[in-house]
Image (tube, grey):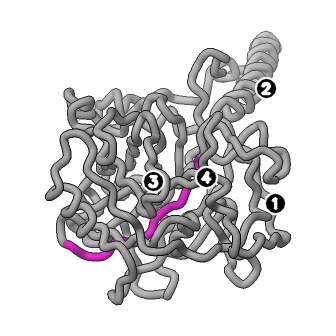
Amino acid sequence: MASPTQETTLIGLCDGELDPKRYQSSYLTNKVGSQPDWLPVISRQCPRCRRCGAPLAHVAQVYCPLDASPYHRNLHLFACLGAECSGGSEGWRVLRSQCLETEAQTPGRPAPAQEATLEATDWCDTADDWGMEEEEGDGWGGGVKKEEKQVQEKAAAPEVEGPGPGLSEMDVSSRLQDLSLGGSHEDVPVFRPFFISVVEDADLYNEYDDLEHAQELLREYERREGAVGELDGGGEVGGGGGEEKYEKTGAKHGDAIFSRFMKKISLCPQQILRYCRSGTPLFISEPPPNMAQVVSACSSCGGSRTFELQLMPALVSLLQRKDGGSEVELEFGTVLVYTCTNSCWTAGSGSAVEEFCFVQADPDQKLFK
């Protein structure tokens, strides 16, 4: 059971398919696949693979405003479907976008309509009914519900801000070219959309503790019954009654890090996402010894970045083409996302800020598929 002083980790789970005929998603929706829903002041972004140049597929959208912040805030993750690309960091990109509440409801934009939808687990303790009563959340949109805003009009063409510290004009120009701001006529693959709901990691451990207690009572009962059976000559009753049936096995790869990963997710193997801003990532294999240097500085302000979320292996099975095309597999173990520690933002920029992805491969190749 997690102690109150430990980091709070939120676990993202698939909460059913998002049917566009029944529900219109928006930037407030936490989802897998489909087209990204950009904030009203953000122009359409069409990122490309750094390795092969192909347009990237939208993998996940997370609405994640920060505590005591006046900003709506989104993270969008994209991946290349090339067999040689998705297993490496160069085949992934993550974009962060923000806007003030006043910008999201500027004059001339229609008031958001609401409609009934499927029930889902709340993102956090403060979101009792997925309503908008509270705009500030604890990481994953506290106070947000699926009965939310419809997609609003996109903003006008973005203003290009000057480079941050340590960034040249060429760096910025290259990044903008890679993102391919504006529309794209190429065929961008689209994954089937699914809602993401959330539970706290601590809640899983509470349920686990209850289960462990029940199992311990059962084992104690079996031990007592076994002893009585042996005294009565009932060999079958007492035979092995006091032994645990569970056999502890060593790490599959002799790898303590992989073993810890498997143990950590064993209470909820279907988790597709873990969120813990400024927390500790759950590595699936040995990270680089110089991980702090591997994570680059913020591309906008030049400041440091902090861990925010990671995609989990169970997500792979959900990533299927919406058009029913050939089966697509993204080869990854976990995708770690690091974002600007200060969540820097320039009002009126109109363009998302690129953050940092670090991809670790599945050490057992298709172990989770």
Residue bearing mark 4: 100
Q: Nearer the viewer, mark 3 or mark 1?
A: 3
Residue type highlighted by circle 2: Ala
Q: Secondary structure at mark 3?
A: strand
Residue bearing mark 2: 214
First of labels 2, 3 by sequence position: 3
- Give the camera-side residue of 154 and 308: 154
Residue bearing mark 1: 119
Residue bearing mark 3: 96
- In the figure, is residue 163 to the left or right of 352? left
Does residue 29 lie above or below 199 as drawn? below
- Give the camera-side residue of 114 and 2: 114
Does residue 64 lie above or below 157 as drawn? above
Where is residue 64? Give x, y as percent: 58, 47
Q: CA distance from mark 1 to mark 2?
A: 30 Å
In the image, the segment drawn in magenta is 53-64
Asked if residue 55 lies in the magenta stretch, the reply is: yes
Question: Does the CB distance between marks 3 and 1 fall below 8 Å?
Answer: no
Question: Does the CB distance between marks 1 and 4 fall below 8 Å?
Answer: no
Residue type highlighted by circle 3: Arg
The 10 Å Cα crowd at callout 4, few under 14, some 14 to 19, many 20 or more, is some
Q: Secondary structure at mark 4?
A: strand
First of labels 1, 4 by sequence position: 4
First of labels 2, 4 by sequence position: 4
First of labels 1, 2 by sequence position: 1
- Which corner quadrant of the image does residue 224 belong to? top right
Q: Residue at x 43, y 42 (%)?
A: 344
